[in-house]
Image (tube, grey):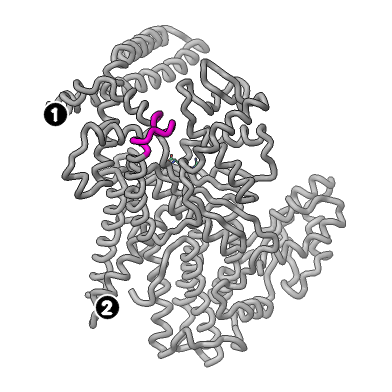
Amino acid sequence: MNLLSLIRRKFVPVLEGYAVEPGPLLDLIRPAQDARHGDFQANFAMSLAKQLGRNPRELAEQISAELDLSEICEAPEVAGPGFINLRLRTGFLQELIQGIAGDDRLGVTPVSHPRHVVVDFSSPNVAKPMHVGHLRSTVIGDAICRTLRFAGHRVTSDNHIGDWGTQFGMIIYGYQNFRDEQLWEADPVTELARLYRLVSQLSEYHAAQAGLIPLEQAAAAAAARCDALSAEAETAEGDSSAKLKKQLSAARKESAAAQAALTGALEKLAVVDADPELSALAAGHPTIARLAREETAKLHAGDAENLRLWEQFLPRCLEALQRVYERLDISFDLTLGESFYNPQLAAVVEGLAERGLAVSSDGAMCVFPEEGKAPFIVRKTDGAYTYATTDLATVQYRHQELQADEVLYVVDKRQAEHFQQLFTTTALWGIDGLGLRHVSFGTVMGENGKPYKTRSGDTVGLESLLDEAVSRARRIVDENDDRREQPALTPEERGRIAEIVGLGGIKYADLHHNRDSDYVFDWDKMLATTGDTATYMQYAYARVCGIFRRLGLRREDLDFKGTAVLLESPEERKLALQLLSFGYAVESVLQEYRPHLLTAWLFSTAEAFSQFFDRCSVQNAESDELRNSRLVLCDLMARAIRTGLSLLGIEVTDTM
Ligand code: ARG
């Protein structure tokens, strides 16, 4: 049951009487911002009046009179220029709450037309440092899968891991040339990460050296242009002065960028030059980048030795990833990495060429999805297939084999152009009836204003990040319990709770930001016990459980069917409305796949509960009837938090 849809539906026949398309007008019927204006507000009269050339207030009055809402609402009131304010009848609200008493789903029924949605998320590149960005994709993608399933859709989660990319050539080269036998024996995954970093460091060293002169020239030229422009600007007047100032500010930006590129290159050189061991390695491997690329090409061409190494590396890397997923309680229906699509790539390019979509350009095969824009390279000059080719094969597979209706790519927003090109190419290719969407997200920033990095920057770093969250949560749990007159928790319980609080904190901190925005990783905010955090929600849950415990009641034994619900006070009414809007919150999350709309709902619900709890005593309620009614609300509140958090992949605990 979705209260808002119910109300909107009541407007349809009335609006049809005005011969207008109701859809966009119905969107303007919303929950009221201010309880004094009622519970819902219809704000479309102004725009409809314009369409019809009428007076908005009169129109609103007329529509109100035509509405048949008497079972649901008090008589509608028209306010201001033509707002229609609706207040639910208390009796109706009470019935609704009675109807969902004890229901974990809070009355939300599965959709009538389920879609099959493939969610491509997490998708780290194995053997390469897994960064917090992948954690973001993992957490957001999992929340989306859970919410879709809750709503009744069919979901196939697919971890499209990068297990076939250029990093393998790099670690193969590293393994053959720089492997430390002892480290390899002790911890292969850490050793592979070290080898990857070493090979990329040496490759970048040579690239920086080769690019130094052009970089210096570019920086000098940009600086000279700034000087020239600023001299000109000093004497210029009026319009031309304004124009020059604009040019100067653009030139300064360019100059700063050129300078930063130069500084970056110099830093890379300095690190290696200062270290005799690294310098010797750099000198001994001057063409390392090319050689590593050749190893990748050999692997892709089926070279036996490189395939053997790949088969040796891959399972170990996957195990390390699996540890992180298990810890986070995240699982995938499919883990079809890039390598899975390798056999299809040649046919993809041929197919595109046959249709005249892929054309040869400087020896490479390219699609030009949009005129004048960057090409989508599907086969490089050296014959290698690309990320683009794999993604095209993947779309085809998801369309033909998985029969998906929709594919979501939960990937960093820096890949927006890639997905734009992929989607356009797919359409040109003739795959239709498949909705493709890039569910993009921003960067996790450190307090220094730069992208956040775990200390070692790899999967191991990610695990220690999770450990740190749990150990910080442990401190909070300990302090809290030690403050009690009689500590209530055993060390095991404290450990279990710390795990729930710590990991929940990390997930929630990520999810409660609009996914498009960058956010700063901040331990203290993340685990704060008040404010919009998982900890606050988890406390609220435990607090409700505590109410029942203190009354000597076991929630799981209570049967609320037939219990009358009374919603006389504004706080009870507000909480009830909030609980009834869960379905609306779930729908809004799925509109554009924005889990923060669910955390926002949880937070408002927790606030509504806290006001209710301050004003409306359960234990000392004026009558048994009222006490029981309030218990129904408390129990629903507990279910709301548990279900809401579960859609975000976050657990709760009865005591904290
Ligand atoms: N492995 C890629 C990366 O780490 C992300 C893959 C996303 N999925 C896709 N189908 N392209 O950047």
The secondary structure making up most of the magenta span is: helix
As drawn, the residue found furthest toward the bottom would be 624
Q: Which residues are magenta?
A: 297-307
The residue nearer to you, when weighing 130 against 99, is 130
Q: Quadrant of the C terminus?
A: bottom left
What type is the residue that disc 1 sits on?
A: Glu
Which mark identifies residue 277? 1
- Residue 71 vertical position relative to residue 10 in the rendered view, above or below: below
Q: Residue at x 55, y 17 (%)?
A: 361
Q: Residue at x 64, y 79 (%)?
A: 99
CB under 8 Å between discs 2 and 1 = no
Q: How many marks?
A: 2
Please name which of the two marks, 2 or 1, marks the residue nearer to the observer. Answer: 1
- Residue 142 vertical position relative to residue 367 in the rendered view, above or below: below
The residue nearer to you, when weighing 22 against 352, is 352
The residue nearer to you, when weighing 152 against 298, is 298
- Residue 317 vertical position relative to residue 357 in the rendered view, above or below: below
Residue 304: say if magenta: yes
Q: Secondary structure at mark 2?
A: loop
Which mark identifies residue 489? 2
- Residue 488 vertical position relative to residue 219 in the rendered view, above or below: below
- For residue 515, side relative to residue 2 (left or right): left
- Disc 2 crowd rating (10 Å Cα; few below 14, some 14-19, many 20+) is some
